[in-house]
Image: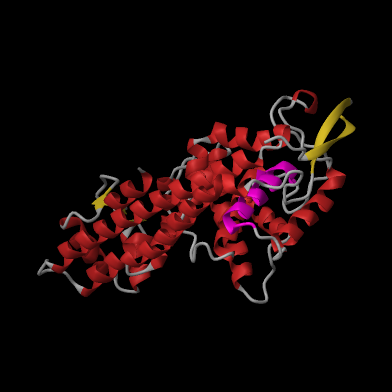
Amino acid sequence: MKRSTGTYATSTTLGEPVRAFVPHPLPPAEPPLAAASFADLNRQAELALARLSGVSGLVPSVDWLLYSAVRKEALLTSQIEGTQATLTDLFDEEAGFKVSNTDDVAEVSNYLRAFRLVQEQLRDPKGLPISVRLLCDAHQLLLDGARGAGKQPGELRHSQNWIGGTRPGNAVFVPPPPERVPELLSNLERFIHDTKDELPALVKIALVHAQFETIHPFLDGNGRIGRLLIAALLEHWRLLAEPLMYLSGYLKQHQAEYYRRLSVIRTEGDWESWVSFFLEGVAVSAAQAEQSIIAVASLIAADRRKLLQSPKASPASYRLFELLPMMPRFTVERVRQQLQTTFPTANAAVQMLEQLGIVIEVTGQKKNRSYSYQAYVDLLTR
């Protein structure tokens, strides 16, 4: 559907004239969003999210699911931007193991810190709401470290950026001039908090994400903060009680289409195409997360039965087993610390789970050995 979604501002950047796109405020107008065109998709996506929330009761602790789901989203959203870390790298770093790609792992860990900050603020009645300030605070954590140096962590950009190409003049897309960014973000913030519009919550989230990416308010990290905003709003608007879905997996799998649908909003005013793509992604991602939870619940139940049927199982081995979904890679020393017991007791508990085929030793060494709940790790990484 053809409509105007913004205007162009001409300025000079790096010595050449540049046409920067300035989006109109949300919601789309002239004509308004054709909600009927994606009503069925919205219902399917809402149902998929409801099923996902319901199936989380299959495991004794939702924290087990959150541990892996949040890390998968952190990993996948970072991979969209070129990070090469794997889920095993992240587990190893948290276990204190040596990892080779420390900078990549640090970027994923930074996303986890940024997401926790936003989640804690939104859950706290006295915390910050979704706002420019909160996003800047999250951005500061996201770009913490060497790779964020010179990219103004926590600050809105003061210079013109661009996407694609070697300079603004041959860029694929040039976001708004820096002096327009505060005003545009204020408009977006008002739209987020406007309770008078009648748009379905998922549709509104789709609009918010696209508008944020168009504004591109930071020098770096815009994609990750924009996708973090999706996860935060899904929980804040009670579409998901917990962040169990990793939408970035779908966006990574369809990365070229993801970028194309965002682009046609600006070039053709086609919001409907983007919203439909987003809703399809939510439905698919929620269904995949549901199947993952069922598989994890089945694995944990089967391994628990092995332990229960063993006459040699000890209290320490039972306690260790309950830690595995949130500690899938570990050493005996880490087990000792977590169980607050002696080294021989911790070692005996690990040996019991190894004998039952629940965990495996991964170094092949006789000393300084490391272990993995490998079947669980394989489930999460497939």
| Viewer-side residue, 192 vs 292 | 192
Q: Is residue 19 magenta?
A: no
Q: Nearer the viewer, residue 317 or 59?
A: 59
Residue 81, horizontal then vertical, whole percent = 58, 38
Can you say which quadrant of the picture contains the C terminus?
top left
Colour theme: secondary structure
Whole-percent x and y of residue 124? 62, 74
Q: Is residue 315 visible?
A: yes
Identify the main secondary structure in magenta. helix
71 sits left or right of 128 in the view: left
Examine the rendered structure and indicate whether residue 337 appears above or below residue 355: below
- Foreground of the two, 298 or 6: 6
What residue appears at the point 76 percent right and 40 percent down from the top-left corner?
5
- Kindly give the residue lying farthest to the front in the view shown: 36
Q: Residue at image x 76%, y 23%?
A: 170
User: Residue most toward the bottom?
Assistant: 125
Residue at x 73% of width, y 54% of height? 154
Q: Quadrant of residue 135 in the image?
A: bottom right
Left or right, residue 354 beside residue 26:
left
Q: Residue at x 66, y 41 (%)?
A: 271
Residue located farthest toward the left when viewing the structure as drawn: 311
Q: Residue 69 at x, y = what percent?
A: 44, 55
Assess whether residue 212 is covered by the magenta stretch.
yes
The percent position of residue 126, horizontal first and vertical second, equals: 67, 76
Q: Quadrant of residue 121?
A: bottom right
| Quadrant location, the N terminus | top right
Name above or below for residue 210 compared with residue 261. below
Count all numbered tags in the image, as a single digit: 0
Residue 113 appears anywhere in the view = no
On screen, residue 334 versus residue 273, left or right, reads: left
Q: Which residues are magenta?
A: 199-222
